[in-house]
Image: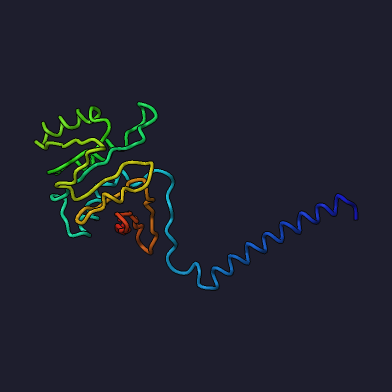
Amino acid sequence: MGEWAKSILIKMLGYLYNFIQKIGRWAARHFKGEGVGPEPEEELPEGNPFLPKLRVILEHILDQYGRDYRTFSPLLLDTDTLPESMLEEDDVELVLEQISRDLNFLKIVTSRPVYFQPYIERMYEDTGLVVQVEGLEEISFGGVNVILDMEKKGNCHYRYMQEGILYIPIYKRPWSQAKTPGNLDISVPIGYNTVIVKGR
């Protein structure tokens, strides 16, 4: 047998060996009970694709904690990663537009208070709501029962987790889809815990 034929035969044996290994791993998972039942949670790509449904998700979370949206008193911790261009949508605006309806309280903690001035004026004119604005160095939690952490960098602010306050990191801990039969549920991190919001 020539050298060329030997090299082709060796490559084919290598491919065959890898294929048999894959079949063996698949069989081990399926015949030892793995792979039976609901699929594992699936992590989502960078960012938070659930932002467009945040209002509905928040209503479900508040309901699970025995609260009503009328008592929803959020502190919004502004982003630390601004959009790279003027054409990109600011996720903070998307969140504010969703949560604004029916709000009786809102506190924004930011290093860019001027950016929020048009929103603050509009909310006062439309609803009479006086939006409170604080700097990062002077955060107070009076009247707050939910913290929406919009920062993307650093760790979760565990020092903000106080009794009676739900701390929801929008980016710092991954939200995921938990596929269960008949539903596509969303796993939302809240403080040290995770809450499953039932999919529709």
Q: Residue at x 24, y 51 (%)?
A: 58
Q: Residue at x 38, y 27 (%)?
A: 85
Q: Nearer the viewer, residue 137 or 6?
A: 137
Q: Residue furthest bottom?
A: 32
Is 133 on the left or on the right of 31, as rendered? left
Residue 184 screen position, x and y as percent? 36, 57
The front one of 185 and 133 is: 133
In the rendered image, the quadrant that contains the N terminus is: bottom right
Q: Is residue 118 left or right of residue 54?
A: left
> Residue at (32%, 46%) from the top-left corner?
170
Q: Is residue 196 above or below residue 31?
A: above
Instruction: Name the image quarter holding residue 186.
Output: bottom left
Q: Residue furthest left?
A: 128
Counting from the top left corner in percent of width and height, residue 19 is at 67, 60
Left or right? Give the position of 166 relative to 3: left
Q: Quadrant of residue 10?
A: bottom right
